[in-house]
């Protein structure tokens, strides 16, 4: 019985040692996925690029660095930039990029390429804004966004990063500048409204003047217009017209059906 227990304990101990050894061995294995690149350094010197799969790491001076080569997105928070005419604006952009040369990105930045990318984008987007006035910045955001890509790409190309797109995410004006722009836009629109109102009044006066000229030379048209005004509309009280001497309706002479002239006073 004792011998059996000793054998069981021995087997368990061997299994534990084998498991510990396996875990130790697995710690020296690293997986390179298809969307990554592996940089193999042996004793501090670059050896080669590794293909996707399992590789030894951390033994015999071997060190493997994994670099993500898929498309990535970097968000730059809004930062203060001055326009050409001295107005401050806050700009925030989104950068879509990929690492085209992993070895170069790793060695040129010491593995801190994210910080270099952030600083490069931060400095590169200032130039297009500094060359424009506030009105130009606000007028065409698409043109401003199109000017971001060349300087950003030039700044990051030296570390092996390809920039595919730089999108304008935020364009924020300070409160005082926003108030000034709002008041200016309101004044401009009020001016347009006043101009359209004046044009409408001018057109109405011109129409009235033309109508007055027509009525002046056409008494029959004048009478027809009066009768038209007297016609009652459905649901409305019919208008009342009071005529005195020399009324609005033309008075014809002779037998035209008009009112007869009063008799002359008798002679003494």
Image (spheres, rainbow, N blue to C red):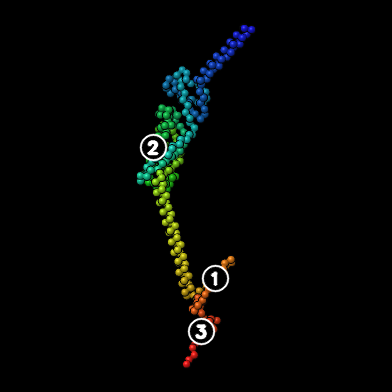
Label at residue 123: 2
Q: Residues within 10 Å of mark 3 (few under 14, many from 20)?
A: few
Residue that mark 3 sits on = 261
Image spot of residue 244 (x, y percent): 50, 77
1 or 3: mark nearer the eye? 1
Which residue shows up at 57% across the image and 12% down it? 13
Residue farthest along the front direction in this orientation: 268
Cα separation, mark 1 vs mark 2, equals 77 Å
Label at residue 239: 1
Residue farthest along the right direction in this orientation: 1
Q: Counting residues from the N terminus, which is met first, the one under dot 2 or under dot 3? A: 2
Q: Counting residues from the N terminus, which is met first, the one under dot 1 or under dot 3? A: 1
Which residue shows up at 56% across the image and 15% down it? 16
Say left or right for 133 vs 59. left
Question: What kind of element bears circle 2?
Answer: helix
2 or 3: mark nearer the eye? 3
Q: Residues within 10 Å of mark 2 (few under 14, many from 20)?
A: few
Residue 109, picture quadrant:
top left
Image spot of residue 209 (x, y percent): 45, 69
Q: Counting residues from the N terminus, which is met first, the one under dot 1 or under dot 2? A: 2
């Amino acid at each position: 019985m004792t011998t059996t227990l000793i054998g069981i304990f021995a087997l368990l101990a061997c299994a534990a040692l084998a498991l510990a050894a396996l875990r130790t061995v697995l710690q020296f294995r690293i997986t390179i996925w298809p969307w990554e690149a592996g940089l193999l350094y042996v004793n501090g010197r670059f050896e080669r690029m590794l293909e996707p799969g399992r590789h030894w790491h951390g033994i015999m001076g071997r060190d493997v660095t994994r670099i993500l080569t898929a498309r990535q997105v970097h968000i730059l928070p809004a930062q203060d930039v001055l326009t050409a005419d001295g107005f401050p604006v806050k700009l925030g952009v989104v950068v879509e990029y990929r690492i085209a040369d992993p070895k170069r990105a790793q060695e040129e930045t010491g593995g801190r390429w994210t910080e270099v990318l952030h600083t490069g984008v931060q400095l590169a987007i200032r130039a297009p804004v500094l060359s424009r006035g506030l009105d130009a910045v606000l007028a065409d955001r698409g043109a401003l966004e199109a000017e971001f890509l060349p300087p950003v790409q030039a700044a990051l190309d030296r570390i092996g990063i390809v920039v595919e797109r730089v999108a304008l995410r935020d364009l924020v004006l300070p409160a005082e500048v926003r108030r000034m722009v709002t008041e200016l836009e309101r004044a401009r629109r009020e001016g347009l409204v006043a101009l359209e109102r004046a044009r409408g009044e001018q057109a109405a006066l011109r129409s009235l003047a033309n109508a007055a000229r027509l009525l002046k030379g056409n008494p029959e048209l004048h009478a027809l217009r009066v009768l038209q005004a007297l016609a009652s509309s459905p649901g409305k009280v019919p208008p009342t017209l009071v005529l005195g001497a020399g009324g609005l309706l033309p008075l014809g002479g002779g037998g035209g059906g008009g009112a007869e002239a009063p008799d002359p006073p008798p002679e003494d």
